[in-house]
Every structure is written in structure tokens, then in C-alpha cells.
Image (spheres, rainbow, N blue to C red):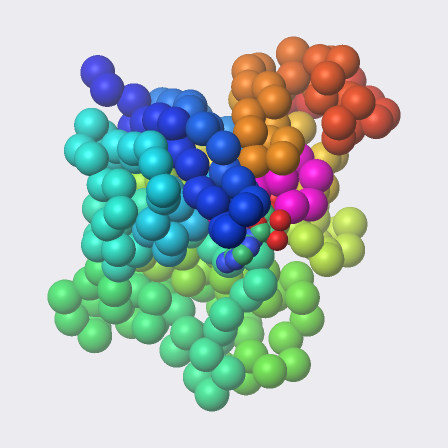
Amino acid sequence: MAPLLTVEHLTKRFGGLTAVNDVSFTVEEGDFLGIIGPNGAGKTTLFNLITGFLPPDAGEVRFKDQPITGWKAYKISRLGMTRTFQITKPFGHLDVKENVVVAALQTSSTLREARERAEGVLRFVGLESYRDRSITHLPMGLKKKLELAKALATRPSLLFLDEVMGGLASDEVQDMMEVLRKVRESGVTLIMIEHVLQAITQLSERLLVLHHGAKLAHGSTREVIRDPEVVEAYLGEVDPDAVH
Ligand SMILES: Nc1ncnc2c1ncn2[C@@H]1O[C@H](COP(=O)(O)OP(=O)(O)O)[C@@H](O)[C@H]1O
Ligand SMILES: [Mg+2]
């Protein structure tokens, strides 16, 4: 059977800068892949290329063996591939529930269906008691949960998470990890960019390391965090016992 996602030789240049340089990897259904690397390594750009927010200069993306390179994000999302944004982008004039309903509408045929789905997702991530709250003053932990809820509301089979733990306090990180474990148990395949190493090494079985736009390492989390090149480029000291 074809992998769920196949990325081949994906490349993106911004002027003289090659932000993503000839990156290839595959993801099987049920995988939890972590993507790590220094700031500016090209992680978010890689997500943008795969999920249709930027067209690549070269390379190919296939979802369930269907070529989707250069497709627009809304079309890709209808196939079951959705992402969150590192910088959350809620609609400020809508409350928590309405933001999730708008997201659900992308892949539902009626408003009623979107509303029901939004209620389910809010319960699933633990936001139901905030459903009528204005999003303007939500704490960061809840903003990140809302971002996750919006993505889940489209019913993805493959979900891309861009630093959903960035800026969270440690109890919020634990909470988010629990929710992500539940997402995974519900059958969603996950690809996650994260700087919170404690979290990503516990959640992902496989890691892809980007450095200057290129793939520096890719393999089991245990192997990758012991790879001397990875340690030198990015990791420094990670407790090898605290991994998946
Ligand atoms: N739209 C853009 N235009 C020009 N340069 C960009 C753009 N997006 C990202 N870059 C540059 O590409 C490189 C990779 O950025 P990014 O993918 O955001 O890295 P990461 O997510 O790993 O921190 C950085 O040098 C960044 O400044
Ligand atoms: Mg980024």
C-alpha cells in the first residue's frame, strides 16, 4: 500500500535563500512524526508547501498516492489534510464556538452539521466551558487549544501541528500532550513541529531534523536524538531516557 503522505525533493527558494532544500520523506497511516530544527531551518515553510499555502519550486507531494503538488489549501483540506498555524489566526469578532463552526463549515454540507461537529470538538479538547467566550483575552494555552480545535473540526486524517506548545506553561504542555494522545488514539496521523523537546520526544516515534532547509536526519526518535550531527546542530543535551 502507498504511504499516506509522500514528499519528494521538495524545494522552495525565497530570492537567494533556499528555505527548503530537496526534502524527501514518507509518512505511514498511524505515524506520529516530529519535525525539529533551529529557528529558520525551514520547518514552517515545509508545512506551507505540503498543505498548499505556498507553491514549491520543485518536488512533489502525494497524499494516498494522489499527486497534490501545488493544490490550494482548501482543496487539500477537503481530502483530509489540515494544519494549525504557529501564529494563531482566530477571527477576533467571533467567540470560541463560532471560530470552530467556521472551520467545520469547510468540510460540512450544512450549518447544523458544522455546529454539532464544533460542539463535539470543543468537548474533545476541553474547551466546552469557554465556548461562548470572546477570544480576545483567552490565555495562550486556550488559544493554542482553539487552534487545534479548528483543525480537528475539518475532520483530518492527517494533521500538521506547527508549534502548538510554543509559549505554554508546563501544566499547559502536559494538558496539550494528553489531548494529542487522544487525537492520535482517535486514528489521526500526526506531523508535529515543536521546540518543546520533552513533549516531542515523548510523543513521536520518528523524528525528522531540518537544518538550513535540508534534511539532517530522519529515523526513530531514539536514534535521531543520539545522532552526533543532530546533537551538534540543534539538541545539545537531551535526556535519552525521556523519549518515546
Ligand atoms: N514568505 C517568505 N518570504 C521570504 N523569506 C521567507 C518567507 N517565509 C520564510 N522565509 C525564510 O525562510 C527561512 C525558513 O523559515 P521558516 O520556514 O519559517 O523556518 P522555521 O519554521 O524552521 O523557523 C527563514 O530564513 C525565513 O526568514
Ligand atoms: Mg516555524
Residue 231 falls in image quadrant: top right
Image side of residue 142 versus residue 89, left or right: right
Q: Which residues are magenta?
A: 37-45
- Quadrant assignment for the C terminus: top right
- Can you name the residue that lies furthest to the right here? 237
Residue shown at the point (65%, 46%) measured from the top left = 40
Q: Quadrant of the N terminus?
A: top left
* Left or right of 20, for residue 114: left
- Please say whether residue 84 is one of the residues in the magenta stretch: no
Q: Residue furthest bottom?
A: 93
Residue 119 in the image, given as x and y percentages of width and height: 37, 66
The structure residue drawn at horizontal position 20% and vertical position 63%, both measured from the top left corner, is 108
What is the magenta segment's predominant secondary structure?
A: loop
- Up-down: is 186 above or below 112? above
Residue 184 in which image quadrant: top left
Percent position of residue 137, x then y: 65, 81
The image position of residue 157, as x and y in percent, is 31, 40
Q: Is residue 40 magenta?
A: yes
Q: Nearer the viewer, residue 129 or 191?
A: 191
Q: Is residue 11 visible?
A: yes
Question: Visible in this render: residue 208?
Answer: no
Q: Is residue 32 above or below residue 229?
A: below
